[in-house]
Amino acid sequence: MSSKKAHQELLKKYAEAVVKVGLNIREGQRLIITYSVSRGVSFHAAPFVREVAKAAYAAGARYVDVIWGDEEMLRLRAENAPRDSFTEYPSWQINGIMNMIENGDALLSIACINPDLLNGLDTEFIGGMQKVHLQNYSPISMAVSRNAINWCVVASSHPEWAQKIFPELTPAKAEEKLWDAIFETTRSTQPDPVAAWQEHIQNLKKRSKYLQDKNYSALQYKAPGTDLTLGLPRGHKWISAQALAENGVVFTANMPTEETFTLPDRHRAEGVVAATFPLSYGGSLIEDFSLTFENGRIVKVHAKKNEAILQKLVDTDEGSSRLGEVALVPASSPIAKRGHLFYSTLFDENASCHIAIGRAYRFTLIGGEELTEEEFVSAGGNTSLNHVDFMIGSPQMDIDGIKEDGTREPVMRQGEWAFDT
């Protein structure tokens, strides 16, 4: 089989897994495909988007549509548009996506990006532009955070992204290698990717059940540069892979996924945590950074590169100075074993334990979807325009589970699970 034909076959298998496992499209559903309203889906992803559309129609989708975007337009705007024009936003796109969500349809986000797109631009200005996006996009973000519909985030290769990961290769070889990485980590190279995903999901669920049964009151992390204790609210739910949407569809929100996660108590974070991977945020890379917490709040940030952007992220709103997710991933995960950064949270978070600045997912608290915002916050949940994961795990990390009576049990040792299921 020619390499071109083999690639097309893998692209088809990948798309089918996304539709059948990620979205689990139901007959009669509509599907909207985008990245975010401010960027849309890059044209580089077009061959993959078309395979997804074919697979969705084969699964019974009634209608599939795409919001396309040219990311260079974002940089052109940042460089050339009038400085007083950046509150302008395509609300018609927000309204279109919300119409799909209110109808119980499905949402697929395809990340196909240049992680250095906005490098070199004024950080204060970029932070402001990102805040305008978050404010306008919040109705969609809130609907996703409570699993209003079946949604999924996946990736497609991009020339600049591939060169960032594999700078020693020619552009063509780098992109080919990135596609290989995407196919392998999403189990698309397996003889039956859907069956492989079903087995993987069951294994992740066993980890979640163990942690749920333990019902720890807090977790303590220790590693070079890290000594952090995170409280867990009463009623927290450990989740992995699959979730049940309000429209009745069981779906898998991220492909790949290797994590088991819940929400921390927004009021109970103490200590310092060092990031172990760079963070790609808003078109810029934040590198070698750490955060210091007191009473749940981030009181100090430090970064060797793009500290101002990190501070702008934390200052977005009150909830951006607190945490909304805690996720456990063994250091030997398939993505970690690849031995390179992806410069993409979708992948790098599945190579490492991570936490998230900002909004908590309502479904990670028992009954959280039914609570008012005030009730959710009172129960320990966090609300924010942001939800930004960053990686903190390593083969040097130990994690203890702390019970209500103060007794401790090992959860992870040297980056690996300290219990069997």
Image: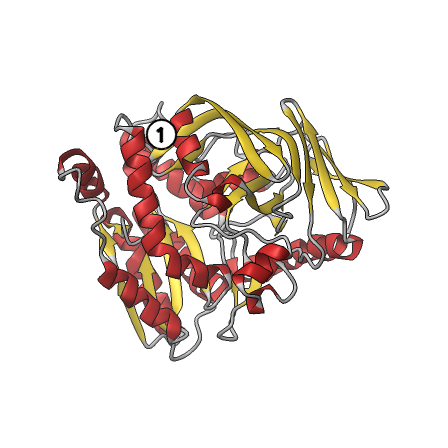
- Would you say 125 lies left or right of 16 here? left
Q: Is residue 342 above or below residue 139?
A: above
Q: Which residue is mark 1?
A: 164
Looking at the picture, tell me which residue is in the foreground, 89 or 1: 89
Residue 158 seen in the figure: no
Looking at the picture, tell me which residue is in the foreground, 210 or 374: 374
Q: Residue furthest bottom?
A: 28
Quadrant of res 225: top right
Residue 402, given in percent of the width and then of the height, sits at 79, 43
Q: Residue at x 56, y 38 (%)?
A: 351
Q: How many numbered marks are there?
A: 1
Looking at the picture, tell me which residue is in the foreground, 143 or 117: 143
Residue 214 seen in the figure: yes
Q: Residue furthest top?
A: 304
- Would you say 396 lies left or right of 83 here? right
Q: Is residue 376 above or below residue 231?
A: below
Local crowd at mark 1 within 10 Å, few (<14), some, or many (≥20)?
Answer: some
Looking at the picture, tell me which residue is in the foreground, 86 or 345: 86
Q: Is residue 332 above or below residue 241?
A: above
Residue 6, given in percent of the width and then of the height, sits at 36, 50
Name the amino acid, label 1: Lys
